[in-house]
Amino acid sequence: MEQKKPHEGHRARLRCRFETEGLDEFEPHNVLELLLFYAIPRRDTNEIAHRLLDRFGSLGGVFSADVKELQKVEGVGRATANFLRLVPAVAREAMLEELGAKPVTADTAGSYFFWYLRGAPKSSTAYLLIGKDGMIAGRGILTEGKRLRRPVTATLVEEAEAAGCSAVMLAHNHADGRLEPSVDDLDATEKIRFTLSEHGIGLLAHYIVTSETAREFMTGN
């Protein structure tokens, strides 16, 4: 009698389990294993999932890992590494699309900045252009990996005027997880707010973003 392979039918069972139960009761390695079915069609992905988690510590660690680092794991080629990077990128775009479909509020702006700056270098600064209808009319990155400084105001003015917007919002991320603004943050924000006001543009809010949340620390025109 032919001996059955250890993982024969395992893929079908795991897919069926997901269809009936969702991911709530899945272990992290099962989540990753199931996902890898669609990138690696004819290999045992259980062991690869374990190796990825052992190296990067968590699902979040796997999805935020660099493509080159992912390929250092046995069984992970370039296509699989790109697939793993694609998953959080697609989730990010879906969230931004959903959050940007309605007029901006203090809560949705914080959530938007949280997702928009996800994966950006620390000490990066982003902006949103807010239209008269309260909708997001544009977005961009002012700085990447360096502190916010007053000269970026020229970019804000140019972008806001080109979009016909008279209001903007800012956010920057903190590498250390602090949600409190530094003295430099407060000083730069006040200078930017003042310069924008000279051009008839209001700075509606400024947020600090960490790996877990976003917090507004400045409001008002």
Image (cartoon, rainbow, N blue to C red):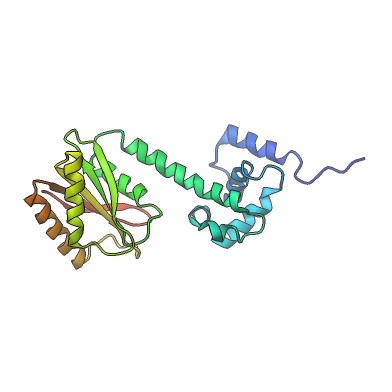
Q: Residue at x 24, y 38 (%)?
A: 137
Looking at the image, which residue sits at the far left? Answer: 198
Q: Is residue 2 left or right of residue 166?
A: right
Q: Where is residue 156 in the image (x, y as percent from the top left)?
A: 20, 50
Instruction: Tell me which corner region of the image, top left, top right, bottom left or bottom right, holds residue 122.
Output: bottom left
Quadrant location, the N terminus: top right
In this image, 9 relative to 216: left or right? right
Q: Position of residue 179 (x, y in %)?
A: 28, 59
- In this view, which residue lies farthest toward the bottom? 183
Give the left or right position of residue 28, taking residue 64 as reference.
Answer: right
Q: Residue at x 57, y 50 (%)?
A: 28
Number of on-image labels: 0
- Based on the displayed image, in which of its 4 quarters is residue 167 positioned? top left
In this view, which residue lies farthest toward the right? 1
Q: In this view, does 19 lie above or below 27?
A: above
Give the x, y percent position of residue 86.
50, 46
Residue 100: percent from the left, percent from the top?
A: 31, 37
Vertical arrangement, residue 91 with respect to residue 118, above or below: above
Residue sitting at 36 percent across and 41 percent down? 96
Residue in the image at 68% along x and 42% along y: 41
